[in-house]
Image (tube, grey):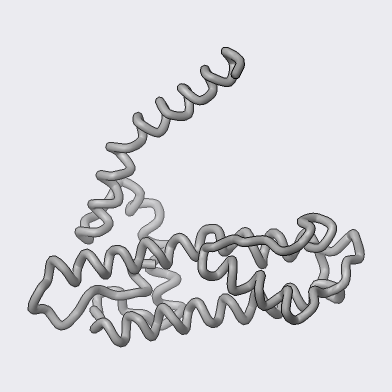
Amino acid sequence: MTLQGWILILGFVGILLALTKPVGSWLFALYEGRRTPLHAVLGPVETGFYRLAGIDPAKEQGWRRYALHMLIFNAMLMALTYAVLRLQGVLPGNPQGLAGLAPHLAFNTAVSFTTNTNWQSYGGESTMSNLSQMFGLTIHNFLSAATGIALAFALFRGFARRSATTIGNFWADA
């Protein structure tokens, strides 16, 4: 390996180590339900989304309701992604004029990205339109990770609150 390669690796590791404490503290504050410096900016936006969706973020859920909401959220995302992939041939954002994906490939891809597996059984830009990549797949890179973090928060609360009947609110956690 070249010197430039080693310097690049050391730079990435240095950045990772430098961000570990601040990001960990921020995630811990989120887990505890405390205000963070970003709350002043993002709080009103978040409150607006909650009002629009009719969600009370302070209302905690038991594990069954939490799991049900997580499954509904992911099923809706998967169905939307499947539809985008199947219909990409008639949707805008397809300057290459690519046809929609076959049912099995669209299903495989939608499940893969919804579950944060991101396994690709297709030829990238020669199969997916710009819209399919941006709206169908890239969104899952964030939302599937958000689901995983929300479930981790719920799991931690479940361990910490041994006798409690609630584990948080999926919508607030996600």
Query: Is residue 5 placed above or below 69 in the rendered structure?
Result: above
Q: Position of residue 95 (x, y in %)?
A: 89, 60
Q: Position of residue 48 (x, y in %)?
A: 43, 70
State the residue at coordinates (41%, 78%): 70
Q: Position of residue 160 (x, y in %)?
A: 13, 66
Work out whether residue 33 or residue 168 is closer to the camera in this orientation and state it. Answer: 168
Q: Is residue 63 left or right of residue 76?
A: left
State the residue at coordinates (59%, 16%): 4
Q: Is residue 20 left or right of residue 160?
A: right
Q: Quadrant of the C terminus?
A: bottom left
State the residue at coordinates (28%, 37%): 21
State the residue at coordinates (12%, 71%): 161
Q: Is residue 110 left or right of residue 19?
A: right
Instruction: Residue lying at the far top in this picture: please name it.
Output: 3
Q: Quadrant of the N terminus?
A: top right
Q: Is residue 38 left or right of residue 129?
A: left
Work out whether residue 68 or residue 58 is closer to the camera in this orientation and state it. Answer: 68
Instruction: Residue lying at the far right in this picture: please name it.
Output: 97
Give the number of callouts.
0
Query: Is residue 29 placed above or below 50 in the rendered structure?
Result: above
Q: Quadrant of residue 113?
A: bottom right
Q: Position of residue 24 (x, y in %)?
A: 28, 44
Instruction: Residue lying at the far left in this picture: please name it.
Output: 163
Q: Quadrant of residue 167?
A: bottom left
Q: Quadrant of residue 141?
A: bottom right
Work out whether residue 25 or residue 5 is closer to the camera in this orientation and state it. Answer: 5
